[in-house]
């Protein structure tokens, strides 16, 4: 297989990347029951090399989903429980004076890892939430004016409870925009929930062994980036993004960054189907998780009981696929 990062993806390479995505998906599904859509979207976030936000009420396996994904990968993993008293230094680290060596020593925080589970991220104040920003955007943190790299594999999975729950803080727009996907983790189906009851406590569930190495993940991410995105697909993504800016139901639409992330996620959706090229249907498949957290409803829409997914459903029905520009 070619190593040229700009070469078109071959059929064999598409099958290779598809195999890796499905291996992770199968390992997740073997542990997390009744969350098929969340499992698929989490895999899309992983292979698109973007951070993921999981939102749902307590008890729907958000943390288990993140822990299981970390177990599937041969990467370092840290979990941080975000609490109201968590400080930025607790996350990124600090320098401490050592009287024996008479020197300041760096004590790194849990952010120095590959996969970081930021559990209940919206239970900590905005100052600590913002401590993640630099790491998520630039894969580095600054401590006392000195920059420290986090590595190319740095990947954040954050969980949050709905804002209606007591003791939660809304994430700043700049922070939510750093998440490629916002995955809504809902209640499982009746049959799936019955299967959970038969299994018993989640604490006794055996996590899977790693199914993907660090190098294999990096290789498959590189293959995903070479999925062909034609002018018609780019045009459709552009039309959809621009439609959010002109919708009367929204006071804030999607940015150009959102459009680029929409196409990146669509490339993974194409790989899951074993294709070397993306289709407008791939854009449609990922539009809700990619865009829902980047939109702000108008007051009228909120009074009418609409949510971002409802607005996006209307736009997906109304925005036509454009013909390629000659």
Image (cartoon, rainbow, N blue to C red):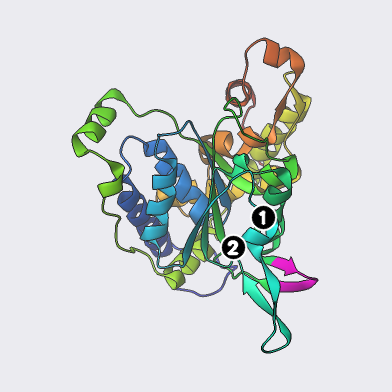
The number of numbered badges drawn on the structure is 2
Q: Residues within 10 Å of mark 2 (few under 14, many from 20)?
A: many
Rendered image quadrant of residue 317: top right
Q: Are marks 1 and 2 in contact (CB under 8 Å)?
A: yes
Q: Nearer the viewer, residue 10 or 189?
A: 189
Secondary structure category for the residue under label 1: helix
Whether residue 326 is visible here, answered yes or no, is no
Secondary structure category for the residue under label 2: loop
- The circle on residue 111 is 2
Say whether disc 1 or disc 2 marks the residue closer to the N-terminus.
2
As measured in the structure, the alpha-carbon distance from the residue carrying label 1 to the one carrying label 2 is 8 Å
Residue that extends furthest to the bottom in the rendered view of this protein:
101
Residue 129: x, y in percent? 68, 48
Residue that extends furthest to the front in the rendered view of this protein:
99
Chain part drawn in magenta: 141-147
- Image quadrant holding the C terminus, namely top right
- Does 256 sit left or right of 165 as displayed? right
- Does 325 sit left or right of 205 as displayed? right
């Amino acid at each position: 297989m070619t190593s040229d990062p700009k070469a078109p993806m071959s059929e064999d390479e598409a099958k290779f990347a598809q195999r890796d995505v499905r291996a992770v998906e199968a390992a997740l599904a073997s542990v997390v029951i009744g969350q098929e859509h969340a499992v698929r979207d989490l895999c899309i976030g992983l292979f698109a090399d973007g951070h993921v936000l999981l939102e749902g009420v307590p008890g729907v396996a958000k943390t288990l989903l993140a822990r299981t994904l970390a177990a599937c990968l041969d990467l370092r993993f840290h979990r941080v429980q975000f609490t109201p008293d968590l400080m930025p230094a607790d996350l990124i680290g600090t320098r401490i004076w050592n009287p024996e060596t008479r020197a300041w020593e760096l004590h790194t925080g849990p952010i120095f890892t590959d996969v970081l589970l930021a559990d209940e991220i919206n239970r900590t104040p905005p100052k600590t939430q913002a401590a993640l920003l630099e790491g998520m955007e630039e894969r580095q943190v600054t401590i006392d004016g000195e920059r420290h790299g986090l590595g190319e594999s740095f990947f954040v999975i954050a969980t949050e409870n709905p804002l209606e729950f007591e003791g939660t803080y809304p994430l700043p727009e700049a922070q939510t925009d750093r998440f490629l996907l916002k995955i809504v983790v809902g209640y499982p189906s009746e049959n799936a929930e019955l299967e959970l009851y038969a299994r018993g406590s989640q604490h006794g569930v055996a996590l899977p062994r790693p199914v993907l190495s660090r190098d294999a993940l990096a290789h498959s991410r590189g293959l995903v980036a070479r999925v062909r995105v034609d002018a018609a697909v780019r045009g459709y993504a552009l039309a959809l993004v621009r439609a959010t800016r002109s919708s009367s139901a929204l006071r804030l639409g999607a940015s150009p960054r959102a459009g680029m992330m929409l196409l990146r996620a669509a490339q993974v959706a194409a790989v899951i189907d074993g294709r070397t090229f993306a289709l407008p249907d791939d854009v449609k498949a990922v539009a809700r998780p990619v865009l829902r957290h980047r939109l702000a409803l108008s007051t009228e829409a909120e009074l009418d009981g609409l949510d971002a997914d409802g607005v996006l459903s209307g736009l997906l029905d109304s925005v036509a696929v454009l013909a390629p520009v000659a």
